[in-house]
Image (tube, rainbow, N blue to C red):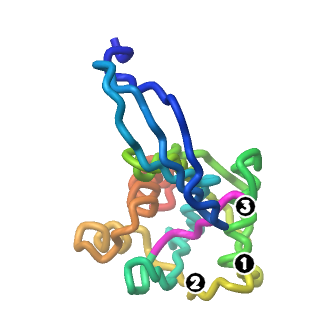
Amino acid sequence: MDEKLMEVLKERELLYDGKVVHLERWTVELPDGRPAIREVIQHVGAVAVVACDGDGMVSMVRQSRIALGRVMVEIPAGKLDNKGENRLEAAQRELLEETGITAANWRHLCDVITSPGFCDEKISLYLATDLSRGSARPDEDEFLDAFSLPYPELIRKIYRGEIQDQKSICALLMARPYLEAQGLI
């Protein structure tokens, strides 16, 4: 059934090989046999974490997002070191780096594809509970402000448009049934 919708990759050309993204021009054959050009960004992938403590407080970060020209409120997250990296280990690393938090309990919530029209980035979303706090260890080029808010307040911020980051919105909403089942919210 889906075969009638599939495009077939015929040729690819690297246009830009960057630190975070790689841009390629793909020549594809459309389902009706005609050729078309696609510009595709390849990304190593990323992870993001909803870290909720025993009082229902969720760890968040504020950081500059220069592409948007503003500071965004997001859950702790980061890119993989390589495509083969264990995603849970990457999530544990990023949570520690950005917030100084470690967690005894981890649950994979889901994977999201950020912009499938032009990018292959997949972000794995996790829930971390039973938290222990320590010192943050951000990367040398990472400036952020870690803070915590009650889960219900974060949901209100989503509906008021104050949190617009899609990975944060998705993860926070996906975490709800698990947080409710554990009596954390």
Q: Nearer the viewer, residue 29 or 148?
A: 29
- Seen in the image, is 179 located left or right of residue 80? left
Mark 3, Cα crowd under 10 Å, few <14 / some 14-19 / many 20+, is many
Residue 75 counted in the magenta span: yes
Determine the residue located farthest toward the left in the rendered image.
160
Give the CA separation, mark 2 to mark 3: 16 Å
Residue under numbered circle 2: 146
Q: Which mark is residue 109?
A: none
Q: Position of residue 62 (x, y in %)?
A: 50, 83
The image quadrant that residue 156 belongs to is bottom left
Circles 3 and 1: CB atoms closer than 8 Å? no
Count of all numbered marks drawn on residues in the image: 3
Along the viewing direction, whichever of 141 and 21 lies nearer the viewer: 21
| Discs 2, 1 touching: Cβ within 8 Å | yes
**Closer to us: 125 or 37:** 37
* Spatial separation of the CA atoms under disc 3 and disc 1: 10 Å
Distance from label 2 to label 1 (Cα)? 9 Å
At a point 43% along the width and 32% down the height, the residue shown is 28
Q: Is residue 11 above or below residue 174?
A: above
Q: Amino acid at mark 3?
A: Gln
Report the side of 67 relative to 48 (left or right).
left
Dot 2 or dot 3, earlier in sequence: 3
- Residue 75 x/y as whole percent: 52, 69
Q: Toward which corner of the image does residue 142 lie, by quadrant? A: bottom right
Magenta stretch: give its range.
74-80
| Residue under the point 64% across and 53% down | 44
- The image quadrant where one finds the N terminus is top left
Q: Which residue is mark 1?
A: 100
Residue 180 visible in image? no
User: Mark 2: which amino acid?
Assistant: Ala
> In this figure, which residue is indicated by the disc labeled 3?
92
Mark 3, secondary structure of its residue: helix
